[in-house]
Amino acid sequence: MRTIKALFAHSLTILWARCVALIGVMLAFSDQLVDLLGLPGVKDQVQAILDAKYVPFYVIAIAIVTELAHRRSLPNQKDDA
């Protein structure tokens, strides 16, 4: 359990940021995956709601900002563990 916590610097914020980044990477490649699986209906539905080519970059940017904000606050906190 300590190893898993260490991967995320003992922080739920870091875990969240990395999950959001992973989702962004998955979305970045979803266009190719939809084409590979032959599911054009899914692609059309997503494009109707959002401009799909920018969504992964928004998610990645949110993850980076979240992690940087948390790391900035780390020196001001004492380690309770």
Image (spheres, rainbow, N blue to C red):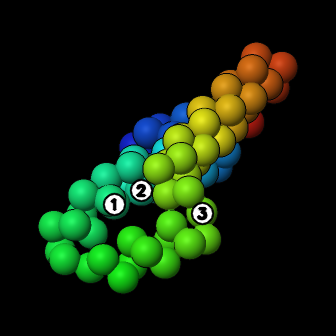
Against 21, residue 75 (above or below) is above
Viewer-nearest residue: 62 or 19: 62
In the drawing, what numbered circle is on residue 50? Answer: 3
> Contact (CB < 8 A) between labels 2 and 1?
yes
Amino acid type at image mark 1: Ser
> Contact (CB < 8 A) between labels 3 and 2?
no
Query: SS at mark 1?
Result: helix
Q: Residue at x 16, y 67 (%)?
A: 36
The residue carrying mark 2 is 27
Q: Residues within 10 Å of mark 2 (few under 14, many from 20)?
A: many
Q: Position of residue 80 (x, y in %)?
A: 74, 36
View extreme (right): residue: 76
Query: SS at mark 2?
Result: helix
User: Image check: 29 left or right of 57?
Assistant: left
Q: Residue at x 74, y 29 (%)?
A: 69
Amino acid type at image mark 3: Leu
Instruction: Tell me which label, 3 or 2, sits earlier in the chain.
Output: 2
User: Image check: 45 left or right of 61?
Assistant: left
Marks 2 and 1, how far apart at CA: 5 Å
Instruction: Tell me which label, 3 or 1, sits earlier in the chain.
Output: 1
The residue carrying mark 1 is 30
Q: Residue at x 60, y 36 (%)?
A: 61
Q: Is residue 5 visible?
A: no
Q: Position of residue 7 (x, y in %)?
A: 44, 39
Amino acid type at image mark 2: Leu
